[in-house]
Image: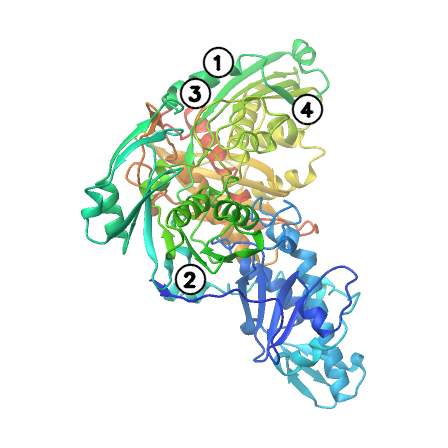
């Protein structure tokens, strides 16, 4: 469903009679005009009583906008029906306090907004009470707020909208008291997501829906090989296609611009193109993997983590266990491909889309268009998935859009459309990785020395292709490794940067997507070699990691671990701490006739305080589906440097028939502050399934996607 929109920047200055706009900064005190001009503005109360939360994070389906609104609603004592959310403008004041820029990622949205939004809500509440006390000439202590209505004992009452203007004229309190969690009404109790109705009715606005007056559609012809550059092009036939209005060259390729998407795509097909592959990746993915395998046998790279002396400990070991694990490139494949609209008028650039990296995207567009950064306005809309695709560090899709607008001299608004084929064949990917693990076991079945060598491209350094000599270890490559997640006295982690001219970027759960599989499958193999139960073996090496141990015990209890699977069934487990959230998953698989099916998943999660238990469960279920999709099908392969997969027919995702019949989620409240749930739920499932299959077949599974029976 498309939407004709004419959107303008919502100013920071409150208009007369519009109500209260509130920002929060430590020790801030201001009169009404000053308060209205706060640049870190988190909520607005309109005269009709609507409370709008300005979210600095992107909601790409994980429900974070509703979660952020619930924090404000709780401290404000608002009624849920009066809450709304809008994307905040791009500005330094809206930076992610964890990541240092305005960006959504690392499952940090709730954690880094928790105190900010609680304080904003409590401050607005205090100002509304002060306004009511002044109007009714009663002490503030005599006033209560419940479900968006302000009352006193004598019978006075008013809605937020009636008091907003008066509240805006009052000084902003320097300190406010936050609620005791035992008094929470929304938080921890569950609530309906704010976006459900709009999405069900097709009225929710995504970047791909935006239409502006006079807007054109652009598609871009890119090199079929990564790193290839345009040599020549002939657009004579393209210009004959009905609806095509312009063809322009950009640093990324050739853009065909038309009145509609079909004309643009048809016109691109008619282009005659030649490419210079001198700097392009020409190898197959199999050849790249062989290079990684050879590197894993060297002492190259750098030591990322070291404790004690692993080599000496293994020399004393009763037994040595070794295993290698291989992981392919993965496409993100969000349902809404990276699509955005740009308009430049009178020196002002506006961009609409599901923007995940506002700071980087704003800076990139400003540089290309030659504008001051404050003249680039970002309108963050809902996004139809991302999984990291919209968070590229080089802002690739926004850069392409800005270059097209520049080439057209900003004569009209442009929507850059990526087809499914564009997105899957044009990168960016989760990096390929290769792990080599070696560990010693004592005669009593304890780990005695451990080395882990990891080969993969660097996301952070030399982006997007990987650096030849990174200055230091890349945590996005090594996070969640076995050395760091289990108690092993003598252990070494070595990271060797892989070299490939293949664009890579952050992916849902980032390095944990491969480190978890390697460490948890290897732990099962060590347990078998030691003749010990996988659960007991893990718990024996989780002594200092109590929260991981706790979710593992809870999952085992709810799953019924310790019993015996039915004939034709097998069990497996995995546990991981990712982004300060701890998740354990146990699975039951059925095996028959050379095929298997995941029947049941039990998930235990400790995400600190769970704002909305229903949404936590939904994210765990969605994570299981996402992780299973990669475990069963996910694989981008290259032939001569060209991706073999182009659409969902060759890059399949999990089907309903493959979804587990039962997914149970149990939340362990550790009393810690809230952490994220958007990524951690996708992390352990592949290893848990592989371990179940190993239990069923006696064969180790060392690569993804899972090949059954094991190759």
Q: Are discs 3 and 4 less than 8 Å apart at CB? A: no
Give residue 15's quadrant in the image.
bottom right
The reply to whether callout 4 and callout 1 are in contact (CB within 8 Å) is no
Q: Is residue 502 left or right of residue 318?
A: left
Residue identified by numbered label 1: 294
x, y percentage for residue 710?
Answer: 38, 23
Residue 679 located left or right of residue 260: right
Give the Cα distance between marks 4 and 2.
50 Å
**Mark 1 and mark 3 in contact (Cβ < 8 Å)?**
no
As measured in the structure, the alpha-carbon distance from the residue carrying label 2 to the one carrying label 1 is 49 Å
Question: How many residues crowd mark 2 within 10 Å: few (<14), some (14–19), many (20+)?
Answer: many
Instruction: Look at 42% across and 58% down and name the residue there.
Output: 206
Q: Which residue is mark 3?
A: 289
Q: Quick one: SS at disc 2?
A: loop
- Element at label 4: loop
Q: Residue at x 40, y 31 (%)?
A: 705
In the rendered image, the quadrant that contains the C terminus is: top left
Lower position in the chain sequence, tag 3 or tag 2 = 2
Identify the residue under disc 4. 488
Task: Identify residue for label 2.
Answer: 205
Q: Picture coordinates of residue 45 (x, y %)?
A: 61, 73
């Amino acid at each position: 469903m498309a939407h004709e929109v004419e959107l303008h920047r919502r100013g920071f200055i409150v208009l007369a009679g519009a109500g209260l706009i509130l920002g929060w900064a430590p020790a801030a005190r201001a009169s009404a005009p000053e308060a209205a001009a706060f640049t870190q503005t988190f909520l607005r109360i309109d005269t009709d009583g609507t409370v709008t939360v300005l979210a600095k994070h992107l909601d790409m389906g994980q429900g974070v906008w509703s979660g952020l609104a619930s924090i404000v609603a709780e401290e404000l004592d608002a009624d849920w029906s009066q809450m709304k959310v809008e994307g905040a403008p791009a500005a330094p004041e809206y930076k992610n306090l964890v990541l240092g820029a305005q960006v959504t990622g690392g499952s940090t949205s709730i954690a880094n907004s928790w105190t900010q939004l609680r304080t904003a809500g409590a401050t607005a509440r205090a100002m509304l009470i002060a306004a009511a006390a002044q109007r009714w000439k009663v002490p503030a202590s005599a006033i209560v707020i419940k479900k968006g209505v302000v009352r006193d004992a004598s019978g006075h009452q008013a809605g937020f909208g009636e008091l907003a203007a008066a509240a805006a004229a009052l000084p902003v309190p320097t300190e406010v008291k936050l609620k005791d969690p035992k008094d929470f009404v929304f938080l921890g109790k569950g609530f309906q997501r704010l976006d459900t109705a709009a999405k069900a009715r097709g009225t929710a606005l995504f970047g791909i829906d935006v239409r502006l007056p006079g807007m054109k559609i652009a598609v871009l012809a890119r090199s079929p090989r990564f790193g290839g550059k345009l040599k020549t092009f002939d657009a004579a036939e393209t210009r004959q296609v009905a609806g095509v209005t312009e063809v322009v060259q950009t640093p990324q390729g050739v853009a065909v611009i038309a009145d509609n998407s079909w004309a643009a795509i048809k016109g691109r097909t008619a282009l005659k193109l030649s490419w210079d592959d001198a700097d392009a990746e020409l190898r197959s993915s199999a050849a790249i993997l062989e290079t990684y395998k050879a590197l894993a046998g060297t002492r190259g790279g750098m030591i990322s983590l070291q404790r004690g002396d692993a080599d000496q400990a293994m020399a004393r070991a009763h037994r040595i266990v070794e295993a290698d694990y291989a992981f392919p490139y993965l496409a993100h494949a969000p349902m809404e491909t990276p699509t955005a609209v740009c308009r430049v008028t009178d020196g002002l650039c506006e961009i609409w889309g599901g923007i995940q990296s506002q700071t980087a995207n704003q800076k990139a567009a400003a540089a290309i268009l030659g504008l001051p950064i404050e003249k680039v306005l970002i309108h963050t809309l809902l996004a139809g998935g991302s999984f990291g695709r919209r968070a590229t560090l080089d802002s690739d899709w926004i850069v392409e859009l800005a270059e097209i607008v520049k080439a057209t001299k900003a004569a009209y608004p442009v929507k850059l459309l990526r087809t499914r084929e564009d997105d899957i064949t044009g990168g960016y990917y989760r990096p390929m990785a290769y792990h080599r693990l070696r560990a010693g076991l004592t005669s009593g079945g304890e780990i005695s020395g451990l080395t882990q060598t990891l080969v993969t491209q660097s996301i952070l350094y030399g982006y997007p292709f990987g650096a030849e000599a990174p200055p230091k270890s890349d945590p996005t490559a090594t996070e969640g490794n076995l050395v760091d997640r289990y108690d092993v006295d003598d252990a070494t982690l070595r990271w060797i940067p892989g070299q490939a001219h293949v664009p890579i970027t952050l992916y849902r759960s980032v390095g944990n997507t491969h480190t978890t599989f390697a460490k948890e499958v290897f732990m099962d193999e060590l347990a078998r070699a030691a003749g010990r139960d996988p659960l007991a073996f893990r718990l024996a090496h989780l002594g200092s990691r109590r929260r991981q141990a706790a979710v593992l015990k809870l999952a085992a209890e709810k799953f019924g671990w310790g019993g015996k699977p039915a004939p034709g069934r097998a069990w497996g487990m995995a546990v991981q701490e990712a982004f300060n959230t701890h998740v354990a998953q146990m699975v039951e698989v059925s095996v028959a006739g050379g095929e298997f099916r995941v029947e049941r998943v039990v998930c235990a999660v400790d995400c600190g305080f769970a704002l909305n238990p229903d949404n936590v469960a939904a994210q765990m279920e969605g994570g299981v589906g996402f992780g299973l999709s990669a475990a069963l099908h996910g694989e981008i392969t290259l032939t001569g440097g060209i991706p073999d997969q182009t659409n969902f027919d060759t890059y399949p995702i999990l089907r309903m028939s493959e979804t587990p019949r039962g997914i149970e989620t149990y939340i362990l409240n550790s009393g810690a502050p809230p952490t994220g749930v958007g990524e951690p739920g996708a992390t352990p499932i592949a290893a848990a399934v592989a371990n179940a299959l190993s239990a069923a077949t006696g064969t180790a599974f060392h690569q993804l996607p899972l090949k059954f029976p094991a190759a």
